[in-house]
């Protein structure tokens, strides 16, 4: 039987994945389509991606705390495998924020760093999606 905190897991994973999806597929494209200049859109997008980093990190840390092995000794392989995707997703978010974003903002080799950041965003989105899928399965803790 899942504890209350474990029942929260799919919701945290859904928030993480859904926020990444909304930001990447809707909000940022809308900024570039509707703001007067690409520079304005880029500046606002940078702020939103930074906020997303902290949302991703918060969701990931809470998921890790809920599913740490000492806390849930009866986890099946699917829930344990989700831990790898959670860790990787949080690592990607933090690397994007502290290693890639400063280079994009300073316009250092912009094409390269924007491509690296985009790939890292998609990989984080995939990690969050796999986490959501694994933790939302009905038989996740059996």
Image (spheres, rainbow, N blue to C red):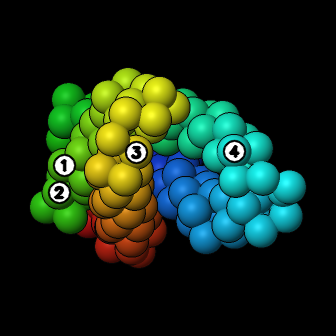
Q: Are marks 1 and 2 in contact (CB under 8 Å)?
A: yes
Residue at figure coordinates x 38%, y 25% from the top left: 98
The earlier-in-sequence mark between 4 and 1 is 4
Residue at figure coordinates x 46%, y 35% from the top left: 107
Q: CA distance from mark 4 to mark 1?
A: 36 Å
Which residue position is annotated with label 4? 39
Q: Secondary structure at mark 1?
A: helix
Image side of residue 104 versus residue 55, left or right: left
Q: CA distance from mark 3 to mark 1?
A: 31 Å
**Crowd around label 4: few <14 · some 14–19 · many ≥20 (10 Å):** few
Q: Nearer the viewer, mark 3 or mark 1?
A: 3
Image side of residue 35 versus residue 5, left or right: right
Which residue position is annotated with label 1? 84
Foreground of the two, 121 or 78: 121
Q: CA distance from mark 1 to mark 2?
A: 5 Å
Which residue position is annotated with label 2? 81
- Image location of residue 46, percent across then percent down: 60, 39
């Amino acid at each position: 039987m899942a504890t209350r905190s474990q029942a929260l897991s799919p919701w945290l994973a859904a928030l993480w994945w859904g926020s990444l999806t909304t930001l990447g597929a809707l909000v940022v494209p809308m900024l570039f389509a509707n703001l007067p200049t690409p520079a304005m859109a880029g500046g606002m997008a940078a702020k939103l991606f930074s906020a997303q980093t902290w949302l991703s990190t918060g969701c990931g840390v809470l998921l890790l705390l809920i599913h740490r092995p000492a806390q849930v000794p009866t986890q099946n392989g699917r829930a344990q495998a989700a831990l790898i995707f959670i860790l990787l997703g949080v690592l990607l978010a933090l690397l994007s924020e502290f290693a890639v974003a400063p280079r994009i903002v300073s316009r250092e080799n912009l094409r390269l760093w924007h491509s690296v950041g985009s790939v890292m965003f998609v990989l984080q989105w995939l990690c969050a999606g796999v986490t959501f899928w694994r933790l939302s399965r009905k038989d996740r803790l059996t």
